[in-house]
Amino acid sequence: MLKKRYSHEKEFFDKHASRVLDTTQNFKIANLSTYEDLFEKIDYLKPIIDFWGDISNKKVLDLACGDGWLSLNLAKSGAKVYGFDVSPQKIELARKYAKENGLDERVTFDVMTSENLTYEDNFFDFAIMHAALHHCDIEKTSKQIHRVLKPGGKAVLIEDYAYHPIMNLYRMLTPGKHTADEKALDDNDLKNFVSGFSSYSYQYYGLLNLFETSNNKLICKIKPFLKAIDSFLYSTFPFTKKYSKLVEIFVIK
C-alpha cells in the first residue's frame, strides 16, 4: 500500500514541480525573510516562535519540504536545515532555490519518505511538517519523528482537519487538486500521532477565516473580521474548534 501511495504522490507533485522548473529562469527570492519574520505574519505559524525560540545553530527537520519554502526561512535564521520530499522534482527545485539565495551550505535536501527516515537517532532539535501528514501513514511517521528528535526535541505539524463542512465539500468537488490517497486528519489520527510523545497540545484555525495566506485585496479587508468572529466562537463555544479548517499539533519528545 505504501509503495502505491509513494507512486501516486511522486507523480502528482513531480508534475507541478516540473512545470515550475520549465518556466522559471530566476530562482532568486527578493527580500527573503527569517523564520521569525515570516511566522509573525501568519496566525497559525506565529505560536511556533514561542514554542521553539531561537533556532540559530539548531538542527531543524522540514518534513515533506516540497520546494523548500519553509527550509529557506529557517536557514535564514541561522538553523542547519534538513529537508526531504517524496518528489525528486520538488527536491531539485528546492536545491535551486537554496543555491540561488546563498543558503545551500545551510540546507540539505534529499528524496525520502516520512515513514522511512534515514537520519540518525536523536539528531534534530526541532521538526516541522506543513500540510503533509494527511498524505502519510500516521503511526509510522510519528515513530520516525520521535526517533530522530533529541530528548526534549519539539515538533509542530499543521494539518487539514476532517470536520469542516465547507472544506469537505471543496475536497469532494475538486478531486484533481488532491492526491488519491490523502485524507484529512480525524481525532483518532491525532491520538495515534501524539501517543508516543511526552507531551502534546493542539491549536485550531479557520472556522470562518479560510483565507489566512490569501493576498487578495478584498479578502485582506475582511480577514480581521473573520478572525475576530472565529476567536469569539472558539472562546464562547469551545465545541466549534471541532469544525476548524486546520489543526496544529505541538509535541515534545
Image: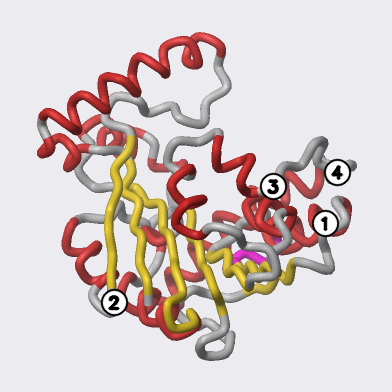
Q: CA distance from mark 4 to mark 3?
A: 15 Å
Which label sits on residue 28?
4
Q: Is residue 172 above or below residue 231?
A: below
Give the secondary structure at mark 3: loop
> Which residue sits at x=51%, y=31%?
213
Q: Which mark is residue 223?
A: none
Answer whether labels 1 and 4 touch (C-beta < 8 Å): no
Tell me which corner region of the image, top left, top right, bottom left or bottom right, holds residue 168: top left
Question: Going 72% across and 52% down the picture, which residue do you hit?
Answer: 18
The x, y position of residue 161, in whole percent, is: 28, 47
Q: Which residues are magenta?
A: 85-89
The residue labelled by disc 1 is: 96
- At 81% across and 46% down in the image, what residue appears? 22
Residue labelled with disc 3: 34
Query: Label 2 sits on what residue type?
Result: Ser
State which mark lies toward you, 2 or 4.
2
Task: Say whether disc 1 or disc 3 marks the residue closer to the N-terminus.
Answer: 3
Which of the two discs, 2 and 4, labels the residue nearer the N terminus? Answer: 4
Q: Earlier in the sequence, mark 3 or mark 2?
A: 3
Q: Quadrant of the C terminus?
A: bottom left
- Residue 49 shown in magenta: no
| Crowd tier of the residue under label 2, counting other residues whose Cα lies within 10 Å: few below 14, some 14–19, many 20 or above | few
Q: In the displayed structure, does residue 53 sit left or right of residue 136?
A: right
Q: CA distance from mark 2 to mark 4?
A: 41 Å
Upstream in sequence: badge 1 or badge 4: 4
